[in-house]
Image (cartoon, rainbow, N blue to C red):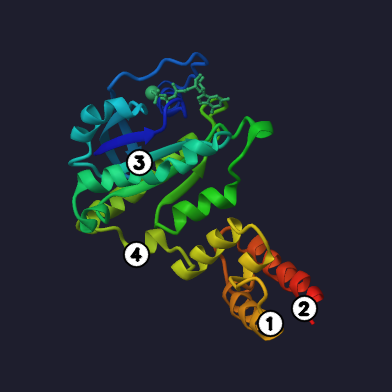
Amino acid sequence: MNVPLSGSVGVCESCIIKRYCEKRFVPKYLATIGIDYGVTKVQVRDREIKVNIFDMAGHPFFYEVRNEFYKDTQGVILVYDVGQKDSFDALDAWLAEMKQELGPHGNMENVVFVVCANKIDCTKHRSVDESEGRLWAESRGFLYFETSAQTGEGINEMFQTFYSAIIDLCDNGGKRPPSSVGVGFTKEQADAIRRIRNSKDSWDILGVKPGATRDEVNKAYRKLAVLLHPDKCVAPGSEDAFKAVVNARTTLLKNIK
Ligand code: GTP
Ligand code: MG
């Protein structure tokens, strides 16, 4: 089993490995140069498995070293720091880099991805909340875990679930079994939530032009309310998005004759 671990510089991949493999935490930051490599044996359900972990340097400079390791990979751990929005935004670029190396879309289906929202012990500085991270991960069919390499929270659980998913994938002839990523929400719902999160005003939230009529506002409202109603939508962040939609409609209707 080959598992690369990637993330921006300083988001803690190395600490996650140390915490997991050696059960200790290293408070000092030592940038990974190129690739670190670790081998460990793990017991997953009734099997003993040898795992090769490749710890990728986050710095873009090491791309040439990293890209060799993406081939022949069964699982990828993407790490970001919940106190550093940039590291979360960078996940798209990491994914794009891997997509390019793993080849056409089909090959991404043969890989289990887990997203690790790390440093959850630093609650004061948190800038990416759980629903945002979870939505990003689960809307892509990826696993999502909240972890802290410092306290150890979530680390073992993350690795165990990750390995289990990889074994399911291998047992299923190399394809992700649909049940293991049973997301329970649609891309349309995920896209609407993301769009609403990034909206700057009430018009934007409802997706209507400033100056729209009552009818247009109500029509847009009804469509989103049905899509995001908490009874129907289980996507992370749907409750907040639904509330934002209700509030946007109320605000706009107050000012439209
Ligand atoms: P590159 O190798 O440059 O890509 O960095 P990296 O992503 O491997 O980061 P590393 O694991 O070396 O951790 C960076 C810094 O964050 C270190 O100073 C760690 O002590 C600190 N750190 C890592 N995990 C945690 C955590 O869960 N909580 C807190 N508070 N600090 C952490
Ligand atoms: Mg490192």
- Point out residue 160 in the picture as x, y percentages from the top left corner: 41, 41
Q: Which residue is mark 1?
A: 213
Q: Is residue 45 visible?
A: no
Q: Label 3 amino acid?
A: Trp
Quadrant (top left/top right/bottom left/bottom right) for the C terminus: bottom right
Q: Label 2 amino acid?
A: Ile
- Asked if marks 4 and 3 touch (Cβ < 8 Å), the reply is no
Q: Earlier in the sequence, mark 4 or mark 2?
A: 4
> Around disc 4, counting alpha carbons within 10 Å, would you say few (fewer than 14), some (14 to 19), or many (20 or more)?
few
Q: Is residue 139 above or below residue 38?
A: below
Q: Which element carries disc 4, helix, strand or loop?
A: helix
- Which residue is at the far front? 211
Q: Is mark 3 within 8 Å of ligand 1?
A: no
Q: Residue at x 18, y 41 (%)?
A: 72
In the rendered structure, find residue 178 and report the number of the disc placed on it: 4
Is residue 129 found left or right of 94 in the rendered image?
Answer: right
In the rendered structure, find residue 94 and report the number of the disc placed on it: 3
Q: Label 4 amino acid?
A: Pro
Q: Is residue 33 above or below residue 93?
A: above
Q: Which residue is mark 2?
A: 256
Q: Earlier in the sequence, mark 2 or mark 3?
A: 3
- Asked if marks 1 and 2 touch (Cβ < 8 Å), the reply is yes
